[in-house]
Image: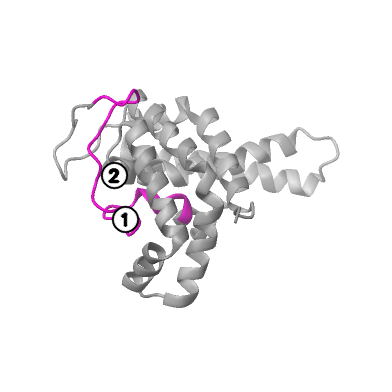
């Protein structure tokens, strides 16, 4: 399948704070509700996350809290990669050791507390949603282009083909993760597509010194 995809590097930064044992987080904060009160853990360690409306709503809270540091994350990740290459351990050390990394870790911990999610839940939600909403964002732009009278017809043919392939992608996704999971993602698509736009815009904004 030749579906246009978001770059691996971009997705890696989008998911940076969703990794288990993140190099930017020192331990895992206790889960809390959006109001700050303790919330029950819904799954034992290692158990599959049950995707729900509530989980996606909380994940949106987490992502919005991370928006102010996305530019720093992109900058820090680029610097860490330049120093560490393909060595994952060195990359983690570089990310955690700098001032930007420490600031990002602090924001991430606060975002977890406000959202009421655990680090493990954010990791699983990132895995389930990042590629799907990245693809959804691209196809939404293609739909706008198709409606434009100034768009070249050969490009419209290309967009139509990509939209057809997105439908194939969704069928494959449903087979892998379940139709109920796909239905929930589609229900929240407008919100997360807008969030993805905001995150990408934040990534290219020069971090404040």
Crowding near the residue tagged with mark 1, few <14, some 14–19, many ≥20 C-alpha atoms within 10 Å:
some
Residue at the spot of label 2: 119
Question: Where is residue 78 shown, x and y percent of the image?
Answer: 52, 66
Q: Quadrant of residue 122?
A: top left
Nearer-the-camera pick, 161 or 41: 41
Identity of the residue drawn at 32% across and 39% down: 177
Q: Is residue 112 above or below residue 37?
A: below
The residue where tag 1 is placed is 22
Q: Dot 1 lies on which element?
A: loop
> Residue 19 lies in magenta, yes or no?
yes
Q: Residue at x 42, y 45 (%)?
A: 107
Q: Which residues, given as a range, are shown in magenta?
A: 13-37
Q: In the image, is 124 to the left or to the right of 202?
A: left
Evaluate if marks 1 and 2 touch, with contact meaning CB atoms under 8 Å apart: yes
Q: Residue at x 30, y 35 (%)?
A: 117
Q: Residue at x 36, y 32 (%)?
A: 115
- x, y percentage for residue 73? 49, 56
């Amino acid at each position: 399948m030749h579906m246009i995809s978001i770059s691996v590097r971009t997705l890696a930064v989008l998911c940076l704070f969703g990794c288990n044992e993140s190099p930017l987080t020192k331990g895992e904060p206790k889960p809390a509700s959006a109001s700050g009160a303790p919330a029950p853990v819904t799954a034992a360690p290692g158990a599959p996350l049950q995707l729900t409306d509530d989980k996606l709503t909380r994940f949106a809270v987490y992502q919005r809290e991370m928006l102010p540091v996305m530019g720093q994350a992109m900058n820090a990740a680029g610097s860490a990669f330049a120093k560490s290459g393909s060595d994952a351990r060195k990359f983690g050390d570089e990310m955690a050791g700098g001032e930007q990394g420490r600031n990002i870790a602090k924001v991430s911990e606060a975002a977890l507390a406000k959202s009421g999610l655990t680090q493990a839940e954010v990791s699983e939600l990132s895995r389930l949603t990042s590629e799907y909403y990245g693809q959804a964002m691209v196809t939404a732009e293609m739909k706008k282009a198709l409606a434009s009278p100034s768009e070249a017809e050969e490009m419209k043919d290309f967009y139509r083909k990509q939209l057809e392939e997105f439908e194939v992608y969704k069928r494959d996704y449903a087979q892998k993760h379940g139709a109920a999971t796909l239905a929930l993602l589609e229900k929240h698509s407008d919100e997360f597509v807008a969030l993805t736009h905001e995150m990408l815009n934040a990534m290219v904004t020069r971090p404040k010194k």
